[in-house]
Image: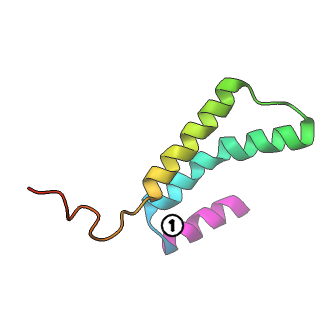
Amino acid sequence: VIAQILLYYLLSKGNVVNVTSLFYFVPIVTSLLDYCILGNKPSLFGIFGMAAIILGIILVFYKPKKGALSHVSS
């Protein structure tokens, strides 16, 4: 219930794309909790998957600096 309330609050205050992009952190957090609490080590493919998720979220939230594309001629 608390997670749903938090979701609706974030959606009302922020951009839908940014808020829903944060849901991709759920498997990473789950894997970290699994390791910390139960001691299950993630597989190599799991680590690569987590890295891909983090890279994707960085790309979603990345904002180029103003004038970064000014040197590109059209």
| x then y, percent, for residue 68 | 29, 64
| x then y, percent, for residue 37 | 91, 42
Residue 43 lies left or right of residue 57; in this view the side is right
Q: Nearer the viewer, residue 26 or 35?
A: 35
| x then y, percent, for residue 64 | 36, 63
**Quadrant in which residue 38 is drawn:** top right
Q: Residue furthest left?
A: 74
| On screen, residue 64 above or below 26 | below
The structure residue drawn at horizontal position 17% and vertical position 57%, both measured from the top left corner, is 72
| On screen, residue 44 above or below 9 | above
The structure residue drawn at horizontal position 51% and vertical position 50%, both measured from the top left corner, is 57
Magenta range: 2-12
The structure residue drawn at horizontal position 45% and vertical position 61%, both measured from the top left corner, is 16
Residue 48 lies left or right of residue 16; in this view the side is right
Q: Nearer the viewer, residue 23 or 66?
A: 66
The structure residue drawn at horizontal position 75% and vertical position 42%, both measured from the top left corner, is 30
The C terminus, quarter of image: bottom left
| On screen, residue 53 above or below 3 | above
Residue 48 lies left or right of residue 71; in this view the side is right
| On screen, residue 1 above or below 28 | below
Amino acid tagged 1: Leu
The N terminus, quarter of image: bottom right
Residue matched to label 1: 11
